Image (tube, grey):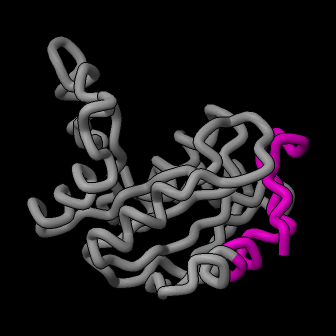
Amino acid sequence: MRSLAKFIYFKLFGWRMTGSFPEVEKCVVIVVPHTSWVDFFLGVLVRKIMDREINYIAKKSLFKWPFGWYFRWTGGAPIDRSKSSDTVKSVAALFDQRKVFRLALAPEGTRKKVSKWKTGFYHIAKEANVPIVMVAFDFGKKEVKFSEPHWTTTDQKADFQSYYAFFKGVLGKVPEYSFDAPV
């Protein structure tokens, strides 16, 4: 399967990778921009090429029969998103429960155009005491770019400025929905 993923990604689609995914067992992976359903399938290809387990969270009702097995098989972890639960603490607890957990999230929170990111990824990384790895899906350059691990600091504003700088100029599948980083 890995050979097939490489053939599709590099030869058929003509994409490249810049940098490499860091050797970390636990991290929050932020993927930007998220403008199309195609992003999920690109991520599956990249994950297979890297031969790394990358996880995601979804509402717990998806993990019931008949499709629960599929979501677990693809790296999903169920989460209670009800008003009575503390989502940040619940997700951070998943890092304690697993030996390897690399949580992929889209800070935009939607595939549509946004003017600012949701901050949950940042608070999850801080609560779980894990680094953030940035991954850019640049459809303009046909490139997936990886950052080194970034540990949160006490200066959230400065941290976000470094994240925005990493993603500056990156175009999504739907360019007009791409995030304009306020650097």
Q: Looking at the picture, how far across and down is residue 39, in whole percent?
A: 61, 43
Stretch in magenta: 161-183
Answer left or right for 174 relative to 127.
right
Residue at the location (17% across, 18% down)? 64
Residue at the location (27% across, 70% down)? 128
* In the image, residue 145 lies in the stretch drawn in magenta: no
* In the image, residue 166 lies in the stretch drawn in magenta: yes
Above or below, 133 relative to 141: below
Is residue 178 or residue 107 the one in the foreground?
A: 107
Q: Looking at the picture, how far across and down is residue 167, in whole percent?
A: 74, 69
Answer left or right for 62 relative to 47.
left
Q: Quadrant of residue 62?
A: top left
Residue at the location (19% across, 12% down)? 66
From where the camera sits, is residue 30 visible?
Answer: yes
Answer left or right for 136 relative to 6.
right
From where the camera sits, is residue 149 visible?
Answer: no
Residue at the location (24% across, 28% down)? 60
Furthest residue toward top: 66
Is residue 154 or residue 152 the one in the foreground?
A: 154
Furthest residue toward right: 176
Answer left or right for 179 relative to 88.
right
Furthest residue toward front: 84
Q: Looking at the picture, how far across and down is residue 11, in whole percent?
A: 67, 56
Above or below, 76 relative to 117: above
Q: Quadrant of residue 80?
A: top left
Above or below, 116 relative to 83: below
Q: How many labels does the image show?
A: 0
Q: Looking at the picture, how far across and down is residue 58, in whole percent?
A: 34, 35
Above or below, 83 relative to 98: above
Q: Quadrant of the C terminus?
A: bottom right
Is residue 113 or residue 86 the one in the foreground?
A: 86
